[in-house]
Structures are given as C-alpha cells and as structure tokens.
C-alpha cells in the first residue's frame, strides 16, 4: 500500500511557501507520492453541477495554481517522493505540447512522474479553451495515441481525425523508461474499459466502496479481454475530505467525517483492492501545519494497518 498527499495548490494554499513546506515535510514523514489536479474556471453560473451530492463547487477552487508548475516546484524540493496528476484534463491540450511538458517534468524530477488523465466534468472549461465538449472521448483516445507514439517511438508520425504530425523525432524521452505510467480517471463503463484496455491504472475518488469495486471489476475484465494482466493495473484512490468533530452519517463518508472515520474507510478501501490512497486536506485545513499534522496521523494509522 502506497500513501500520498495532495500538494498545496488551491484556496488558501495557492502559494509557493505552502508547496515547498508541505512537499518537504511529506517526503520526510515517509509519504510515497504528491498529487496535483487541474481546474481553470470558477463559473458564476456553471454549465454542469459539481459531482457531489449538493452539486456545489468548493469555494476553495476560486484560486487554483497550474498543476505541472506546482509539481515542478515540489520536485525541486524533494528527492524521492513520486509526483502525480489527478487528473490532467487531457483533451484541453495539444498532445505534442502535453507530451513535452510531461516529459520535461519527468526529466527534471529524475523520473518520478505518474501521468494521470481525465475528461473533466465542466463544459464551461472546454468552451474557455476552444475545445468541443462533444466527442471528447474520441479526442481523449487520439490524444493518448499521440502521447504513446511520442514516448514509445524513435520516429513519430501521426495522421488522425484531429491531429497530424509529419515524420519527426521528438526528444528527450521520459527519464524513467519508454513512457510515463498512464493512469486514467472516469466513472462510466466506457471509461473503465479504456483503463483496462490501455492504461496502467485507474484514478478514482472516494465514493461508496461497493460502487468503486464494481467499476474496478469492469477495468480488470477489460484488461483480461485485451490480453493484458489485470493484476498489473493500479487502483489509486483520491480522498477529498472535510473533517468533522462528530461522527458523520455513513452516506457522508468519505466526503466528510472524523479523521478516524476517514482512516477506517481508507483501510477498508485497501482491503477492497486499492493500491494507493492519497489525501487532499485543502478543503478542511486552514494552515500548512494542520495539513502536515493531520496527514502525518493518517499516514501512521495507515502504516499500522
């Protein structure tokens, strides 16, 4: 079991001092990974509800730092801890430029990057970057095709419905090998089949475990159908928590609850098949000291099992 922490990135923690302090402390305490997400808008009248029960985007998202810049800063102040995106909304970016940015971070961090991609949930953000909301899944698949060619091949050539690359060499390659580990988000059967067919693992978010394990089964069956080893897939689970002083009702966990309730959920998720769990405290903590202290308690409890 690997344990990670969301790097300070948004809300009150959107500043370089917080990134540096928490990243250094996380590595010193023994965390395995640091993660950053992708958000570009805080619409006054959003096109889609936020994917929680109340449908309201967290107020902390009003200030949000760009994820690869944040992870680059974190990498400069750490040596061992892995770095991950959970998730980059891949269709927003031209894939050649996305490959260059990710490869650069992997090289600068001495091969510590996990590339986590998703589709996002807010149509307004697609509008803002002039990318069609419709057929975003097909754009996602072709983006992954281009990334894999760039990372795998010496000479790259691509002629697809959306992107064209003339025969060329693109260097450097990722530091850690032929390509970056690719993790994909999503909560539809199509998304999970994509995970099983072509990714190294799934990026989930804390929900009822029966629901998550049902989706995970789809990914594993898809991997087997594609002639891949299902046991090679990683199940990485993000917990966006709001800690409470009193016990929350079962249907509120792990979105909110006491720290002990969140720990119990995380341990149950591990038993249910999660390979890595990381904690995002930016929606509940008010200081970096609180992030470090609560994160440390969570880490110790998870290690004790």
Image: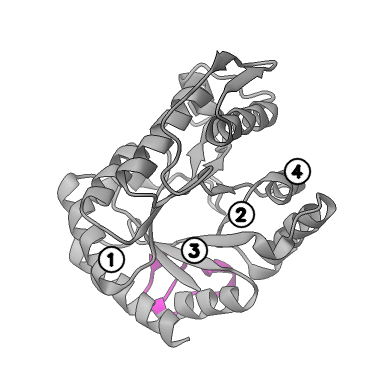
User: In the rendering, at what x and y percent does residue 236 appear?
Assistant: 54, 60
Dot 4, crowdedness within 10 Å: few (<14), some or many (≥20)?
Answer: few
**Can you name the residue that lies furthest to the bottom here?**
304
**Quadrant in the picture for residue 72:** top left
Disc 4, SS: helix
Disc 3, SS: loop
Which of pointers 4 and 3 lies earlier in the amino acid sequence?
4
Residue picked out by circle 1: 26
Depth check, mark 4 against mark 1: the one in front is: 1
Which of pointers 4 and 1 lies earlier in the amino acid sequence?
1
**Can you name the residue that lies furthest to the front here?**
154
Which of pointers 1 and 2 lies earlier in the amino acid sequence?
1
The CA span between labels 3 and 2 is 19 Å
Relative vertical location of residue 45 with respect to residue 12 in this rendering, above or below: above
Question: Can residue 225 be seen in this snapshot?
Answer: yes
Residue 190 image label: 4
């Amino acid at each position: 079991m690997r344990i990670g922490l969301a790097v300070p990135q948004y809300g009150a923690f959107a500043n370089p001092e917080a990134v540096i302090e928490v990243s250094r402390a996380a590595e010193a305490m023994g965390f395995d990974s640091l993660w950053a997400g992708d958000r570009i808008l805080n619409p006054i009248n959003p096109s889609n509800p936020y994917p929680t029960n109340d449908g309201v985007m967290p107020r902390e998202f009003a200030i949000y730092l760009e994820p690869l810049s944040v992870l680059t800063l974190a990498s400069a102040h750490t040596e061992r801890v892995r770095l991950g995106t959970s998730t980059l909304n891949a269709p927003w970016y031209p894939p050649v430029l996305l490959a260059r940015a990710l490869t650069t971070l992997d090289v600068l961090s001495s091969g510590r990057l996990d590339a986590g991609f998703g589709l996002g949930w807010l149509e307004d953000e697609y509008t803002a970057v002039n990318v069609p909301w419709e057929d975003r899944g097909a754009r996602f698949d072709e983006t992954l095709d281009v990334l894999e060619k760039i990372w795998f091949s010496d000479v790259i050539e691509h002629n697809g419905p959306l992107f064209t690359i003339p025969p060329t060499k693109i260097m450097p390659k990722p530091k850690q090998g032929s390509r970056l580990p690719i993790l994909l988000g999503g909560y539809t059967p199509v998304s999970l089949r994509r995970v099983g067919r072509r990714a190294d693992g799934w990026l989930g978010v804390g929900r009822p475990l029966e629901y998550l394990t049902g989706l995970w089964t789809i990914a594993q069956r898809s991997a087997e159908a594609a002639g891949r080893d299902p046991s090679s897939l990683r199940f990485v689970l993000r917990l966006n928590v709001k800690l409470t002083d009193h016990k929350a009702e079962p249907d509120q966990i792990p979105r909110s609850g006491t720290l002990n309730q969140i720990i119990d959920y995380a341990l149950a998720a591990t038993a249910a098949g999660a390979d890595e769990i990381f904690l995002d405290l930016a929606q509940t903590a008010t200081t970096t000291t609180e992030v470090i202290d609560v994160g440390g308690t969570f880490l110790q409890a998870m290690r004790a099992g």
